[in-house]
Amino acid sequence: MDHEKAHEGLTPAVRAAYLERIGVADPGAPTEANLARLQWAHLRAVPFENLSIHLGEPVVLDPAALVAKVVDRRRGGFCYELNGAFAELLRSLGYRVSLLAARVFDRERLGPPFDHLALRVDLAEPWLVDVGFGRFSHQPLRLDERGEQADPQGVFTIVPGGPYWELDVLMDGAPQYRLDPRPYPLADFGPTCWWQSTSPQSPFAKGATCTLPTEDGGRITLSGHRLIRTAPDGTRDERRLTDAEALAAYREHFGIVLDRLPAQPTVPAQPGEAVAAV
């Protein structure tokens, strides 16, 4: 099956609402420049967050549900949700998109298969597009390029990894994830997404995180009750918030309106994607 043609895509009304959500009035034709513009707009508007896990909400890997969460509910999500929804938008705009699976590096240890969902977008050449990894490239990366690729977030390289056909994606020399270049349907990510959403051993179970890049190249993050502002040079300013201040911070900084705070974790934080991404 041709995975990028496995469904009908967004209606014109939903596509327009999605573009309004990310602040893009005219997406233009499918080009490298317009793809880069769409990726940065999405990163700036739609936060990387795992709040559903701590609010007791199910994570539903259905294209319509993913788009509705981002567009209608004005929420973000983690990789399966963000890249899954962005794939729908890109396809509706005429881009050829495939879903790629990756295993996330936790120091030297690799996570399970389908640990992460990224996108391949084919134009004149293939591009790696990722709006669901938190602190990562701001621009698409050339998937076939083996040299250094400069990005506002750092220097990225994509090199052969593992014993087979996988590719390791590195940021400033540090491995981020091992990419399987074969396309997969969204349903294949379901079991690992369920584990990430429900297991006490999942890095996403360790605490609620919500984060966005700032226009100047920094980052703002709400991790539990800690509001963290990271400057472009890496310096951090951290402030602990009250419950009322945390609810206000979700609204002010991320456009997320909650009637209650996410539950506090019952297990201590460990290294992993939910932590490393901020």
Image (cartoon, helix red, strand yellow):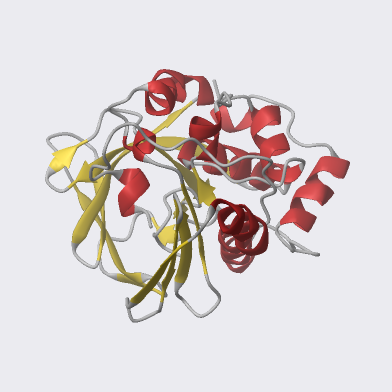
Q: Is residue 42 above or below residue 113?
A: below
Q: Is residue 140 above or below residue 152?
A: above
The residue at 33%/45% (across/down) is: 273
Side (left or right) of 254 relative to 103: right
The residue at 49%/31% (across/down) is: 53
Task: Give the x, y percent position of residue 46.
Answer: 61, 54
> Can see residue 122?
no
The residue at 80%/64% (across/down) is: 25
Q: Which is nearer the eye, 266 or 276? A: 266
Q: Quadrant of the N terminus?
A: top right
Total residue callouts: 0
Q: Quadrant of residue 195?
A: top left
> Can see residue 119?
yes
Side (left or right) of 235 relative to 166: right
Task: Give the x, y percent position of residue 44.
Answer: 59, 64
Q: Quadrant of residue 85?
A: top right
Side (left or right) of 23 relative to 44: right
Task: Give the x, y percent position of residue 186.
Answer: 52, 26
The residue at 88%/43% (across/down) is: 13
**Residue lying at the far right of the rendered structure:** 13
Task: Give the x, y percent position of residue 226.
Answer: 43, 58
Q: Quadrant of the C terminus?
A: bottom left
